[in-house]
Image (spheres, rainbow, N blue to C red):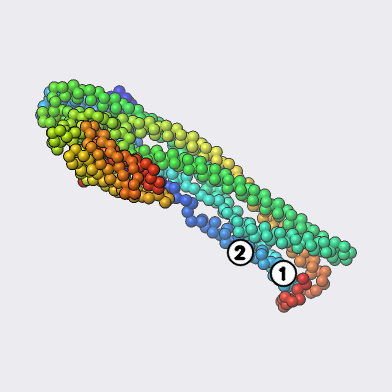
Amino acid sequence: MKDGPMKRAWLRDPALRLFNDTLLNGTLRRAILCGLAAAALLGGQARDGYERAYSDWRQSDPNLERDAGTAGDALTPRTEKAAAGAASYVSARKAFYDTQRAALAESMKVLEPFELPAETEAAKAAGSFLSAQEASVSASIQVFASNADRGIQQLSQALEKERAALVALRSAIAARETAADAARRTNESAGRARNAATDRIKAIAASFEQSSQDATQLAQAWTSYYRALATGARGLGGAEPTPAPAIRPSLSAPSTTSSAPPSAAGAPGRPLPAIPISRYTGSWSFLAGVSTYHGLPPVTFDVFVREEGGQIFGTVNARFIVGGKADPAVRFDFSGPLKAVRYQAFPLQTADGAKGTVELIPGNAFNLLEVNYTLDGAPAKVRESDVILVKR
Amino acid sequence: MAALLGAASFAAAQDKPAGAPSEAAQIAEKRAAEWSVLASNLEQRVARLLPCDARVRTAIEEVSRASEARFAALNAFWQEAAKLSRSQADAARKLIVENGARIADWKADRVDSEQEQTRLVAETSDLRDSARQQTALANAARALTGVSQNAAAATRQAATREDASANLDTNLKELITAVESRQTAIENELKALTTENTRWTAYYAARITRAQLECSITGAAADPAPAPRPPARKGK
């Protein structure tokens, strides 16, 4: 990104260019830039904030990875500095995502639905009143029609006027009902358009929320990476770096190879998975804030897996947030031979006899396991789910 | 999960149905009910009175006033709806402008993500070269691959958002069109309300005229408080 928009933002900002061009030392410049970035964030210019943080981080040590093979212990302070830069950048970028999401939430408030007046009871009363009056007036007119008395004739004329008023009234009521129906129809149409717009806004806001969560995990991943880089540069193999970068079920790239050594639990003659058996076995649970999923949201999702003589035995106990009369609970057992692949797939069976398959896929960190199941022909059940679980 | 739960709570907060009836709605409902009772009972009340009983006119005027009050309240209710509708149209127009400004930011965010990914590819390549010299860097290489995957996901997400923002623009334009149609319909309804109110007033005026004629024909002097006719004597 060194020649990208972040760099351009850096260069087009006169204040920053001035600092860049003068003899300000790196530390002072960095301090000033941090202040400016914070001010930009507060001023709602979160993107400029993360772009600056990115430039600052990336320009500080562009040869870090290139030097890692030869620098040895000397790389450690450089990785620490880079880790701090990465943390600042990811934090600023998270602020950008959060700012966007908050702005979208505000947008939603101005599109609240409303209902138009409904006047069914009064309309019914008016209708029956009119009918009764029309009948009564018409009957009176008929009775007085042949009466030559002047007073009665005057009364008859008054009744005619009253009837005309009733006819005009009926017409006005019908016209208003038509207008009200049109208003209600257009309101429904506006409601649908509003829902489409708000659904879109919600989806974008959710995407920013997801990005914000990913940024949190990415910050950990960069810290982990720089730690592993420093350790590796010193010639120490170290443990697998933890914690892991953000992962989502959709991003769990299938892989059948791994450089990780097989588990010591793998006895001679026993089929070994491509990665340690401990990446599959044990107690795994859905952990809000860490676990991600595809499908219906789980309330709980507990899996217990054990290995015995090259066979995997497991139990899944899950409960989901469901709509209607669907059964929120899913429980099944599975078993099968351990294979020498990363993706382990097993047939499953529920207590009430439904069958299906379950896949166990180790996550990007040692303490994460993706569980993906499908039930065949199990009406009213949650028939599929894909969840990242955390080892207990 | 937290993200999705967050989105769910966001959705719950924003997608609430229209709340409790407004004051205008409550008043309109009350006035309609009051008129409905008086209008339904009018003829029954009048039939029990002598033609020149002052209470005949009073009863008709009472219903007429209730009718006026009903329409005044209905008019206020629809005016409120018109105001809300106008506000929604204005809000949608404002959102289109804001969305235009955001699109620029989101596009830049996507470009930033792509360039970050490019940078990661270069770093990964550098690290791979270094790992040839120092095999202990394998773990770091794996971690960097994880970071690259995350960056790729972020790029995809940013691109999706960029597309969604263009679609949002379309949605908002459709909303404005729909809201403008509704606005026209509400204004037509307000006109129709005025017409209907006028017709009711004309009807009640005609009804009073008839009552006055009935009195003059019978030639009876108005009794300030005559006793109501017993039901048995009603001319049926």
Tell me the quarter of the image containing the N terminus of chain A: top left
* Callout 1 touching callout 2 (CB < 8 Å): no
* Kind of element beneath mark 1: helix
Identify which residue is drawn at 80% across, 58% down.
Answer: A160
Residue at (45% x, 42% y) in the render: A198
Graded by Cα atoms within 10 Å as few (under 14), some (14 to 19) or many (20 or more), the crowding at tag 1 reads some
Q: Name the image quarter holding residue A232.
A: top left
Figure check: A264 above or below A168? above
A383 and A293: which is toward the camera? A383
Q: Is residue B8 visible in the rendered structure shown here?
A: no
Which residue appears at 29% of the width and 31% of the height? A253
Chain under numbered label 2: B
Picture quadrant of residue B35: bottom right
User: Relative to B55, does residue B128 appear above or below in the rendering?
Assistant: above
Q: Which mark is residue B34?
A: 2
Q: Nearer the viewer, residue A359 or A16?
A: A359
The answer for which chain carries disc 1 is B
Report, in whole angstroms, how far the alpha carbon at label 1 lies from the one at label 2.
18 Å
Mark 2 residue element: helix
Residue beneath label 1, please?
A: B46
Q: Amino acid at mark 1?
A: Val
Q: Which tag, 1 or 2, sits closer to the chain's start? A: 2
Residue A353 position within the rendered picture, expressed as x and y whole percent measured from the top left: 34, 47
Q: Position of residue A179 (x, y in %)?
A: 63, 48
The amino acid at mark 2 is: Glu
Name the spot of residue A346 as percent of width and height, x first: 28, 38
Few, some or many residues within 10 Å of mark 2 (<14, 14–19, 20+): some
Labels in figure, total: 2
